[in-house]
Image (cartoon, rainbow, N blue to C red):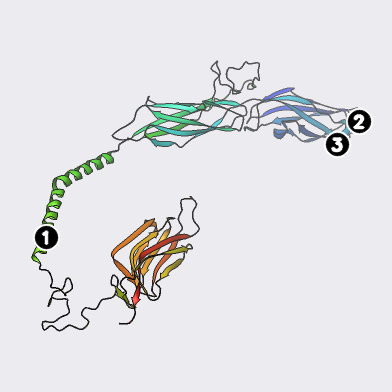
Amino acid sequence: MTTSAELGLPALTVAPGGVATTTLTVRNDLDIVEAYTFEVVGDCAGWTKVEPARVSLYPGTSETVTVRLAPPRSPATRAGEFPLGIRVLPVERPDLVTVPEATVTVTPFQELQAALAPRRRRGWLRGRYRASVRNLGNAPTGVTFTPGQAGEDLRFRVTPEKLRLEPGESGEVRVQARTRKLIWFGKQATWPFEVTVGPEERADGKEAKDGKPGKDAKEEKAPEAAPGTAQPPVQKPLLDGEFLQLPIFPKWLLALLAALIALLLAWFALVRPAVRSSAKQAAEKAVAQQIATPAPPAGVPAGDTPGSPGTGSTPGGQTKPGAGKPTTGPGSQGGPGGLAVPGTGQQSSAAIDVVTETGTAKTGSYQVPHGKVFDITDLVVANFQGDQGLVTIMAGNTTITTIALETFRNQDYHWVTPLQVPEDQAVTANVTCEVPGTPASGKQAPTCHELLNVSGTLSDIRQGN
């Protein structure tokens, strides 16, 4: 005595996304009431069900259950022939298990997903694009890319010309669109085009389902559709692209050149003769005034004449209080600490290095030694990192300048009349750091870093009267 089970069809064909059914007949040849459970084994187990999943049979009776196959429409459901087995397991006599088998054919389907990036390019002669495609079908597919345009203004090149993709696999090609001629002057031109993505065709005009055109039908023949079912047409993605061709010389450039030529003509025709005439007249006037001015008597300082304003003398010959004394302040030869001793000046320079954290302010300084006076003639500020923020430079109590860091990399100042810094006072650079810059290394610096170089003459101060 045993258990017997038989599938209704020895072979089935099912399309992904569809449903196919068959029957399973179970007979109890035992002398006891037996219950049977069903388990699907093989590659079809993930999408095959037996309904109902359990039956009970009296001795000598049989019952038919339904086997439902519903493979999903995805690349994971590969096309081809697969074995299907149903394990029929008796509950009371598990040693009498039986496994009827059948062959299931999964039909192929083709589906492609494609994209073009970027969709628009600008250039003088050519534009380069990337076309990507993914095989969403369940069989290997050869994919071709066919660019096209309504006219004959563009020429195309696809590299590589075709791809062979397994189910679920992605690939990418390079598409180049090139115009036939340049636009030297005038407006820009827009050239729209399309790229058709589709399965590769065989030599007989049919689509190559295995990605190998012209292959003999006996070799790796793809499974056909189930009888009576129509294969849906393959959707070929159509990618829209655009090439915007720019002129070599745009209109605004021509207008600018015309304006520059007009300015040059105006300069040579009108402004230059007038400037030369004014300069000549000013020079002649200065020479005439020098000839007409008498030389000062001996013993009288240059620029002063007896009784003239600014000498400190009155018509009676008395000297005003304080007349002839040197003044103090920037550019003078003395300060609060006394007068500079002639002949003691030596060229001197100082560097002020200021490193500042982000969002903070820091001051660097150079203090003039006691008994010295510093006449500044040159000042150079270096923002070599390209930091963003603010720097304020002071000489003693006088503010020389305040500059936004992002407006310069190197800034220099020069004075004919020196800026004087008395003894025990300082030249200071106050830096407020907002954003550290990026030096030549290409990596953004963690802190702001400014360097101030001050040059001039450092002289002794005359002590006493």
The answer to which quarter of the image holds residue 206 is: top right
Residue underneath mark 3:
91
Q: How far across and down, in percent of the image, does residue 435 sit?
A: 45, 58
The residue indicated by pointer 2 is: 31
User: Residues under labels 2 and 1: Cα distance?
Assistant: 145 Å
| Of pointers 2 and 1, the one earlier in the residue sequence | 2
- Say which mark, if any, is on residue 82: none
Residue in the image at 34% along x and 35% along y: 246
Q: In this picture, is 73 found above or below 273?
A: above
Q: Amino acid at mark 1?
A: Val
Answer above or below: position of 27 versus 332: above
Residue 405, position in %: x, y? 39, 59
Q: Secondary structure at mark 3?
A: loop
State if disc 1 and disc 2 touch (CB < 8 Å).
no
At horizontal 45% and vertical 64% (from top left) the residue drawn is: 354
Q: Secondary structure at mark 2?
A: loop
Q: Badge 1 is on which residue?
A: 287
Q: Circles 3 and 2: CB distance less than 8 Å?
A: no
Quarter of the image for residue 86 reads: top right
* Res. 106 image quadrant: top right
Where in the figure is residue 61, as x and y percent of width and height? 85, 28
Pick the residue in front: 374 or 352. Answer: 374
- At label 2, which amino acid type do we have? Asp
Judged left or right of residue 257, residue 364 is right
Mark closer to the chain start, 3 or 2? 2
